[in-house]
């Protein structure tokens, strides 16, 4: 026993090589960058390449950039003109939402965080009530808050909604709508009844086989065809319906993966205790499956959030749409790089945070087994 | 009961669509495909002129979609393989640059990337007169890439297809090698013969050169195609890199150690022992990435690359007001391309799958 641990400790001891910090750094460099001739060459090539890209980028983005001032006249240097972003920031976040009502959007963001935290927190003991709150009370509250029209709030047309707020809103609605539908479809795909199974498989494969863009376009162009005359549905709602239907197919596959991850013995044991099929699924299989699929759902949400940019093509103004709109402003022509780098950065921060959380959760789940 | 409700819903939607259509005086039918169109397609692989039928426009667009998808799949696979291997490098710098690339690309929307390449990179290139000369005689400017072209002489009509057939025959003949037939190994000699055939068909090289306000000669690769290609391949590569990494890690460590102890060089271990085994694990997730690339090629609409979506959900729809038919065509074609691709990959998967494990 002691011999084995000594052997195991050997590489560890090497990584804490004795000596001054300088010597240790030298040791690290030698091992990680200049271990062999090939490695040294590789390091030098990569370093040269980095020198070619990083300093000019930093020069453009930081040292030679401008952020002060209120007009484009402030941007005299050859670096980036962040003044443009700073001046148009409200447009990028709130779209054309009336400036006096910004607090409503801010409050909605705060509510989203407040309702999500207990659902996502590790230590929460009874998650189900919080999930139900998130998917029932929260949407009602936010719909009232954002569109208003009664109880003392001024009505704000959905045409004015836009920017980052629109992307977040649509992502939330789509998840809330497609998760239940996806669960149903996943059960349908595993069903014993051939008709239900075939229909579910057809639905899932059909949506997964066509590009999201055609689906969104269909919602914009084709959906009115299927409605009675005189009934017109808001453009935003139509896009949401399309996204929910589309995303449900992807959710179904994630959920199916989770259902397959639950040991069959669980189901059999519950059935042998005399529980009805519905009870077995609802109280035994689904809770265990949902626990496994949280990382998968987070991945889907990340994809979905990135895909909200496609709304730009069908004429809704999400973050990318507002950036493109701002770029067409004659007072601020020629700042395409700044605009796109900014929107990429916003998406990167949001998506990286979400996927990092998903990964840490995945690790915890793996460790808990 | 569920089924009855579903059937009722479909009937209701169908009747609603029919009444709405009759009110708009548009019947349902694909007869418009035979009518002549009235628009130009700026980039195409087969001849096209204003006034050709919509059916031919469909063919032009499908070929454009297939072209950019195929180019992106090849580039994404190669780049993804490189980045995936870099991710596992012993070199700290290489490993983390690969990680940074993957995280940066995976966490920004594909549409933003494509538009960025188009608007912020390709559109800021100099005009034709100040073209950037690239090695090999290619030119790069705001109107795209200009590559030297092979001008055919009168013998090329026979020689070039012949060369193509020879190249295509090699993989099939190569397979015979495993059955110990001498033909298999000798099939490699077809390649130089094909090259000679191809060279004999060349009259001269057509170099692109600035003339007036434009570029004369050579083959033009429009910037829309370059932007879409870059966007699709880089985005796909980041996902493929993670697949490659996971697949390589899934190969048992003992395999590598055994190969090293047999005296194989590290590079041989990678190419002859690790990658062939990782390939089996890679194929199913790779298939779904390829399907994603094909589907995402519809994002070409954002940079006006004339692919299926851009032409049929844009120009054609505006000219003919045939919404239902255009959408049906679009969805049917994307579905069939995807089904064909996944059938091909499944066939390949069955072929390389380990038998009797």
Image: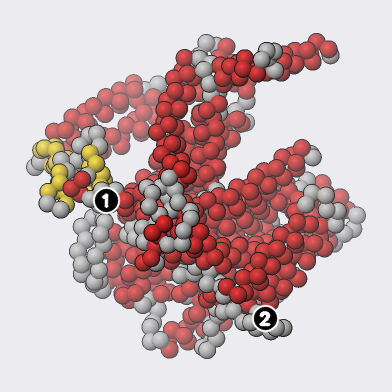
Left or right: A273 in relation to B173: right
Residue located 82% across and 46% down the image: A265
In which quadrant is the N terminus of chain B drawn?
bottom right
Instruction: State the residue position of label 1.
Output: B142
- Is label 2 or label 1 in front? 2
User: Could you say whether the residue bearing mark 1 is in a helix, strand or loop?
Assistant: loop
Residue B14 showing in the rendered view: no
Residue B90 lies, in percent from the top left, at 55, 23
Q: Which residue is pictured at 83% across the width and 49% down the height?
A: A123
Where on the picture, by quarter, is residue B315? bottom left
> Dot 2 corresponds to which residue?
A153
Relative height, residue B278 to residue B255 (above, below): below
At label 1, counting other C-alpha atoms closer than 10 Å, the crowd grade (few under 14, some 14-19, many 20 or more) is: some
Residue A86 versus residue A147: which sits nearer the camera? A86
Quarter residue B87 falls in:
top right
Which residue corresponds to the image point at 36% horizontal and 61% vertical from the top-left? A333
């Amino acid at each position: 026993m002691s011999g084995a641990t000594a052997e195991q400790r050997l590489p560890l001891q090497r990584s804490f090589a004795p000596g001054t910090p300088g010597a240790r750094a030298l040791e690290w460099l030698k091992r990680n960058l200049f271990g062999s001739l090939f490695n040294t060459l590789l390091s030098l090539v990569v370093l040269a390449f980095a020198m070619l890209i990083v300093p000019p980028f930093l020069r453009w983005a930081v040292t030679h950039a401008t952020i002060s001032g209120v007009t484009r006249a402030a941007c005299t240097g050859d670096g980036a003109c962040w003044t443009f972003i700073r001046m148009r920031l409200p447009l990028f976040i709130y779209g054309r939402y009336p400036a006096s009502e910004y607090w409503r959007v801010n409050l909605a963001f705060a509510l989203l965080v407040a309702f999500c935290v207990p659902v996502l927190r590790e230590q929460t003991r009874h998650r189900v009530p919080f999930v139900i709150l998130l998917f029932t009370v929260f949407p009602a509250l936010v719909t009232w808050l954002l569109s208003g029209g009664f109880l003392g709030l001024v009505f704000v047309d959905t045409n004015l909604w836009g920017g980052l707020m629109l992307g977040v809103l649509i992502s939330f609605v789509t998840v809330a709508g497609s998760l239940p539908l996806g669960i149903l479809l996943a059960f349908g795909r595993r069903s014993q009844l051939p008709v239900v199974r075939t229909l579910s498989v057809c639905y899932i494969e059909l949506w997964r086989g066509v590009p999201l863009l055609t689906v969104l376009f269909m919602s914009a162009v084709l959906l009115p065809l299927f409605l009675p005359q005189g009934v017109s549905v808001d453009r935003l709602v139509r896009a949401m319906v399309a996204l929910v239907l589309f995303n449900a197919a992807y959710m179904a596959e994630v959920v199916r993966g989770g259902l397959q991850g639950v040991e069959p013995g669980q189901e059999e044991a519950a059935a042998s205790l005399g529980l009805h099929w519905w009870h077995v699924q609802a109280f035994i299989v689904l809770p265990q499956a949902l626990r496994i699929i949280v990382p998968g759902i987070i991945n889907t949400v990340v994809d979905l959030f990135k895909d909200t940019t496609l709304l730009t093509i069908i004429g809704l103004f999400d973050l990318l749409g507002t950036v493109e709109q701002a770029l067409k402003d004659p007072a601020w022509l020629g700042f395409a790089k700044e605009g796109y780098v900014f929107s990429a950065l916003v998406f990167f921060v949001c998506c990286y945070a979400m996927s990092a959380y998903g990964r840490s959760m995945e690790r915890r789940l793996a460790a808990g087994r | 009961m569920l089924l009855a409700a579903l059937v009722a819903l479909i009937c209701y939607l169908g009747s609603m669509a029919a009444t709405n259509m009759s009110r708009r005086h548009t019947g349902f039918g694909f007869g418009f495909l035979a009518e002549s169109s009235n628009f130009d397609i700026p980039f195409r692989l087969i001849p096209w002129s204003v006034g050709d039928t919509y059916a031919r426009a469909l063919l032009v667009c499908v070929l454009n979609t297939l072209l950019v998808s195929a180019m992106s799949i090849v580039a994404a696979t190669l780049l993804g393989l490189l980045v995936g291997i870099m991710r596992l490098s012993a070199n700290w710098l290489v490993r983390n640059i690969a990680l940074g690339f993957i995280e940066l690309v995976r966490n920004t929307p594909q549409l933003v990337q494509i538009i960025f390449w188009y608007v912020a990179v390709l559109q800021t290139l100099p005009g034709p007169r100040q073209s950037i000369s690239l090695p090999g005689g290619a030119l790069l400017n705001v109107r795209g890439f200009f590559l030297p072209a092979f001008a055919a002489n009168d013998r090329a009509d026979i020689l070039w297809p012949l060369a193509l057939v020879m190249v295509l025959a090699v993989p099939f003949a190569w397979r015979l090698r495993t059955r110990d037939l001498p033909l298999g190994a000798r099939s490699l000699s077809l390649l130089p013969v094909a090259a000679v055939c191809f060279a004999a068909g060349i009259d001269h090289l057509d170099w692109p050169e600035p003339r007036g306000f434009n570029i004369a000669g050579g083959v033009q690769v429009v910037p829309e195609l370059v932007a879409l290609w870059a966007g699709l391949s880089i985005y796909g590569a980041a996902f493929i890199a993670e697949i490659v990494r996971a697949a390589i890690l899934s190969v048992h460590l003992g395999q590598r150690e055994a190969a090293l102890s047999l005296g194989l060089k590290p590079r041989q271990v990678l190419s002859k022992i690790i990658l062939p085994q990782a390939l089996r694990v890679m194929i199913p997730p790779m298939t779904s990435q390829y399907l994603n690339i094909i589907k995402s090629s519809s994002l070409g609409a954002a940079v006006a690359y004339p692919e299926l979506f851009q032409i049929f959900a844009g120009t054609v729809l505006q000219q003919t007001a045939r919404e239902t038919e255009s959408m049906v065509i679009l969805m049917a074609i994307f579905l069939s391309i995807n089904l064909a691709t996944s059938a091909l990959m499944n066939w390949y998967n069955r072929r390389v799958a380990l038998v009797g494990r």
